[in-house]
Image (cartoon, grey):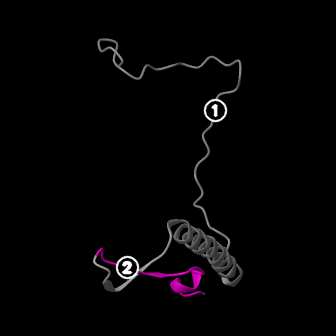
Amino acid sequence: MKMPAEYLACPVFELMYPTGETAESVPVVAYTDALQAVEAALADAERYKYLLMRALRRSAPIVAQQYPELPALLFPEPGTDTRVLPLYPHNEQAA
């Protein structure tokens, strides 16, 4: 994995005051260079994430998930006469 400074393959300038004095330890890079460095770092992060997830999947023990047995709903046979019960009492209006 790279260090953050390794993504900046561009000239780094020193910040200067209008009087001509240099500011203490304030490196300055161009916006496009900084943007390229961030994009390269994000691309590497995605690649490292992919490699890590693949390694985790390969090293994980294979365990079949156990789901509880749920009772099956019995639906009436088509064509049979079934009662339909309202959800609300008849004196209340449904929203």
Q: Residue at x 60, y 62 (%)?
A: 67
Looking at the rendered structure, the kind of residue marked 2 is Leu
- The answer to whether the residues at label 1 and label 2 have Cβ atoms under 8 Å apart is no
Q: Position of residue 1 (x, y in %)?
A: 60, 87
Which callout, 1 or 2, points at the residue further toward the start of the chain?
Answer: 2
Write down the residue under mark 2. 15
Picture residue at 29% right of the left edge, 11% below the top: 91
- The numbered dot on residue 41 is none
Residue drawn at (37%, 79%) of the image:
15
Q: Residues within 10 Å of mark 2 (few under 14, many from 20)?
A: some
Image position of 66 with respect to 80: above or below: below
Q: Position of residue 59 (x, y in %)?
A: 68, 84
Residue 75's mark?
A: 1
The range drawn in magenta is 2-18
> What residue appears at the point 52 percent right and 83 percent down from the top-left corner?
4
Q: Is residue 89 left or right of residue 29?
A: left
Question: In this view of the protein, which residue sits in the foreground, 32 or 5?
Answer: 32
Which type of secondary structure does the marked residue at label 1 adopt?
A: loop
